[in-house]
Amino acid sequence: MATITGYLAGEVPIKIYEMGLLPGVVLTMKQQLPFNGPVCIHIQDNPNAIALRRSEADLILIESLS
C-alpha cells in the first residue's frame, strides 16, 4: 500500500485527476505487466481497478505505507 504524495511533472494529464488519483489517496498495485505494459492499481474504498499506461503511472509520486 502507498499514498500519492504529488506528481513528477508540472502538467499532469486531466485523466489522472478524473480517475481520482489525487494526493492523499491510498492505493495498492495489483499487477504490473511486462515489456513496459500497463499498471493495474486499486484505490482504497473503491471496488474498481484502474489500468494506467506506464508513462502515466511514472508521473505519480508515492510514499510506501509499510
Image: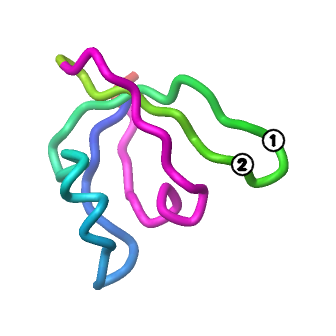
State left or right for residue 10 relative to residue 57: left
Q: Which portion, as a residue range, is magenta? A: 46-64
Q: Report the disc number at residue 34.
A: 1
Q: What secondary structure is found at the residue carrying circle 1?
A: loop
Residue 54 magenta-highlighted = yes
Q: What secondary structure is found at the residue carrying circle 2?
A: loop
Q: Amino acid at mark 1?
A: Pro
Give the residue displayed 52% in from the left and 61% down from the top.
58
Answer few, some or many: residues within 10 Å of disc 1's Cα (few below 14, many 20 plus, some between 14 and 19): few
Residue 44 against residue 58 in the figure, above or below: above
Count numbered badges in the picture.
2
Residue 36's x, y, as percent? 75, 54
Residue 63 magenta-highlighted = yes
Q: Which residue is mark 2?
A: 37
Quarter of the image containing the C terminus? top left
State left or right for residue 46 relative to residue 64: left
Give the residue displayed 81% in from the left and 41% down from the top.
34
Pick the residue in front: 52 or 63: 52
State left or right for residue 8 relative to residue 38: left
Q: Are marks 2 and 1 in contact (CB under 8 Å)?
A: yes
